[in-house]
Amino acid sequence: MNEDTKVLRDYLLFTVPHVTVLAGALLGVLLLLGVKLNVALGIFTIFYGFMLLILALVIREHFSKLLWYRLAVTFFVGLVLMGLLLLFYGE
């Protein structure tokens, strides 16, 4: 594993848990407010994917050539799209 891949791994290991806790708190609040489950999960997934995508865009300059970075960005965009599907078609 080269040095850039290790730095990317460490960056994701130290930032993704913070975003996960924030998105989980949003999901909890939505469920406590009585929002429908599909709507709450859609909002959660959009928010989680969007926040992870912001993290990825912050480090784009340094890691855009790495395959793992591209895979992660693809997964984050997929989360946002899945959230949109849940929000609009999950009845």
Image (tube, grey):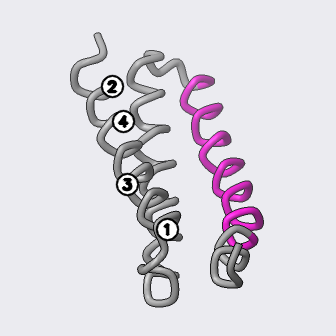
The CA distance from mark 2 to mark 3 is 18 Å
- Say which label, 4 or 3, has the lower sequence index: 3
Please state the horizontal and vertical placement of residue 77, each as a whole percent of the image. Answer: 35, 52
Residue at numbered disc 1? 69
Q: Do callouts 2 and 3 mark residues in contact (Cβ within 8 Å)?
A: no
Residue at numbered disc 3? 74
The CA distance from mark 4 to mark 2 is 5 Å
Number of the front mark, 1 or 2: 1
Look at the picture and state if 10 lies above or below 76.
below
The CA distance from mark 1 to mark 3 is 9 Å
Q: Do callouts 4 and 2 mark residues in contact (Cβ within 8 Å)?
A: yes
Q: Callout 4 environment at 10 Å: few (<14), some (14 to 19), or many (20+)?
A: many
Q: Which residues are magenta?
A: 10-32
Please state the horizontal and vertical placement of residue 76, each as a whole percent of the image. Answer: 43, 52
Residue at numbered disc 2? 86
Q: Do callouts 1 and 2 mark residues in contact (Cβ within 8 Å)?
A: no
**Outermost residue toward the front in this view:** 1
**Three-letter code, disc 1:** Tyr
* Residue at 59% from the left image edge and 41% from the top image edge: 26
**Three-letter code, disc 3:** Thr
- Say which label, 2 or 3, has the lower sequence index: 3
- Say which label, 1 or 2, has the lower sequence index: 1
Q: Is residue 3 magenta?
A: no
Picture disc at residue 83: 4
Q: Would you identify the image quadrant in which residue 60 lies? A: bottom left
- Say which label, 1 or 3, has the lower sequence index: 1
* Residue at 47% from the left image edge and 16% from the top image edge: 37
